[in-house]
Image (cartoon, rainbow, N blue to C red):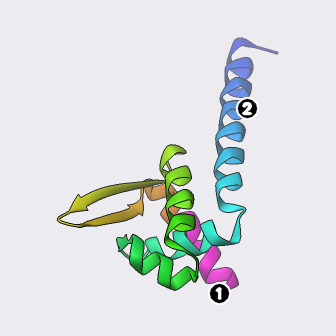
Amino acid sequence: MTISDQSLSKTLLKQCDTVSQLLKSLSHPVRLKILCQLIERERTVNELTEFCEISQSAMSQFLGRMKQEGVVDSRREQNFMYYRVNDPSLVKLLRAIKEIYC
């Protein structure tokens, strides 16, 4: 194996790890529902809670985990916290999933 091949192999392995972590984030139905809402536009916690039909505390846990994983980002505006998908590549992936399965 040449140095170039070894470098490519290491890059591929790192990308596989990154994609695997991302797919784990998508693997829960509620997280997937949240993300499908966020690809359209920013949403408040209340909007997401209502759409997913879960408690606000459960929603906060889901959003907190996704924020920690770097999947979503947030901003505060007055009394509201708005969430959005953090990565344009993830938006493309989610739109493709939505188009194929929804």
Are there few (<14), some (14-19), or many (20+) residues within 10 Å of tag 1?
A: few
For residue 87, side relative to residue 77 (left or right):
right
- Looking at the rendered structure, the kind of residue marked 1 is Cys
- Residue placed under numbered mark 2 in the picture: 13
The picture places residue 101, in percent across and down from the top left corner, at 70, 83
> What is the magenta segment's predominant secondary structure?
helix
| Residue visible at 71% across and 53% down in the picture | 24
Q: Quadrant of the C terminus?
A: bottom right
Q: Tell me the amino acid under the disc marked 2.
A: Leu
The nearer-to-camera label among 1 and 2 is 1
Image coordinates of residue 82 in percent, x first then y, are 32, 65
Residue plotted at (76% across, 14% down): 2
User: Residue pushed farthest top?
Assistant: 3
Of 97 and 23, the residue lying toward us: 23
Q: Position of residue 19 (x, y in %)?
A: 67, 47
Q: Which residue in the protein does label 1 denote?
A: 102
Residue drawn at x 58%, y 64% as measured from the top left: 93
